[in-house]
Image: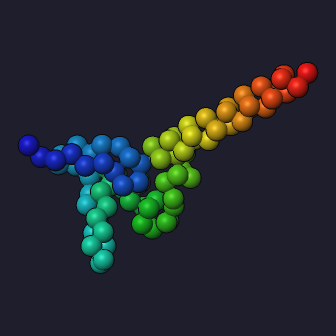
Amino acid sequence: MPAKHICSFCGREIEPGTGKMYVLRDGTVYYFCSSKCQKNMIELRRIPRKVRWTEAYRKEKEIRLHVLRRKADEGENSGSSEA
């Protein structure tokens, strides 16, 4: 059974027989599901965490929102205990 790979940029699963494997001179291997992902990472040198449609962005956004909610809850709790 062929191995399924995950796109190095967007984080989506790549079906066997599709996508591209890009190997750098230092031996680092990148798998891309589309030319869009390849161009964003290799040519435009974009960071996946800062591109809205990537899985890395969604994961970081979830963490940021969790931290903000926790800070808001702590602020509400500490304000009500003083009164």
In the rendered image, is residue 83 in sight?
Answer: yes
Q: Position of residue 24 (x, y in %)?
A: 31, 73
Residue that sits furthest to the left in the current view: 1
User: Where residue 63 sits in the image (x, y, percent)?
Assistant: 57, 40
Q: Nearer the viewer, residue 58 or 15?
A: 58
Left or right: 5 in relation to 53: left
Dividing the picture into quadrants, the one containing residue 12 is top left
Give the side of residue 33 with respect to residue 15, left or right: right
Residue at point 16%, 47% (across, down): 3
Farthest-out residue, front: 82
All told, the count of numbered labels is 0
Q: Does residue 36 appear to the left or right of 74 in the view shown?
A: left
User: Depth check: 12 or 61 in front?
Assistant: 61
Question: Residue at 49% across / 66% down in the picture?
Answer: 45
Residue furthest out toward the bottom: 25
Residues 28 and 22: in front is 28
Q: In which quadrant is the C terminus drawn? A: top right
Estimate the x, y position of residue 34 in percent, counting from the top left.
34, 52
When asked about the image quadrant of residue 26, the answer is bottom left
Q: Quadrant of residue 36?
A: bottom left
Q: How is the image coloured?
A: rainbow
Residue 53 appears in the rendering: no
- Seen in the picture, residue 66 relative to 7 is either above or below; the reply is above
Q: Position of residue 62 (x, y in %)?
A: 56, 37
Quarter the N terminus occupies: top left
